[in-house]
Image: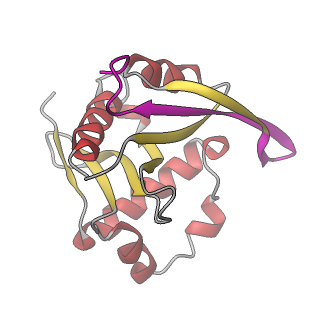
Amino acid sequence: MQMNIRVLIESDAVIYQELRLKALKNNPEAFGSTFERESKFTKQMIVDRIKPTENKFVLGAFDENMVLVGMVTFMREASPKTIHKANIFGMFVAPEARGKSIGKSLLLELIKMAKKCNGVEQLNLTVVSENKPAKKLYESLGFKVYGVERNALKFNGKYYDEDLMAFYINRMDTI
């Protein structure tokens, strides 16, 4: 499958929002936000969310028809004591595009770009503990679990634990 990965820009707001709402609808347990909340976001709110800056970007994966089928967000910490860390959020691949290494390609590109961010040493993410496919992907790229947050999310009366994972950019035990 031919795939194009690039940083999303302001003009991608509509297609980003479509995929984001699909993510919140298809996998509500995997995200801290909700479909109901984000479906009310204005276009300007979405533009502000995805507008790339020196310390934040959203990568999008486009299929051969230039349809956005995957995304992941990078956001660097702002505090002087935590600026060496960045967080990975909102990872999602559309169900019809899964099993084609799109998630892996997105993360590899994100790691490559993070390595070019002066001073970023560590990438952190959280994943629902029961999400075995996502955990397997993250571990295959060198992310390691360093803790578990019990009852991190609550959706429809059910609690979900989250594994806290980190990738260390300049360590020999990672890619």
Magenta span includes 161 = yes
Expressed as whole percent of the image width and height from the top left, the position of residue 92 reads 44, 42
Q: How many marks?
A: 0
Expressed as whole percent of the image width and height from the top left, the position of residue 124 reads 50, 41
> Residue drawn 20% across and 47% down?
116
Residue 93 visible somewhere in the drawing:
no
86 to 48, vertically: above or below:
above
Q: Is residue 37 left or right of residue 8?
A: right
Expressed as whole percent of the image width and height from the top left, the position of residue 40 reads 57, 75
Image quarter in which the C terminus is found: top left
Q: Residue furthest right?
A: 157
Residue 24 visible somewhere in the drawing:
yes
Magenta span includes 26 = no
State the extent of the magenta-drawn residues as a range. 151-175
> Residue drawn 23% across and 46% down?
113
Q: Quadrant of residue 10?
A: bottom left
48 or 84: nearer the viewer: 84
> Residue drawn 27% across and 32% down?
108
Expressed as whole percent of the image width and height from the top left, the position of residue 151 reads 81, 40
Q: Main secondary structure of the magenta part?
A: strand
Q: Is residue 94 left or right of residue 108?
A: right
Image quarter in which the N terminus is found: top left
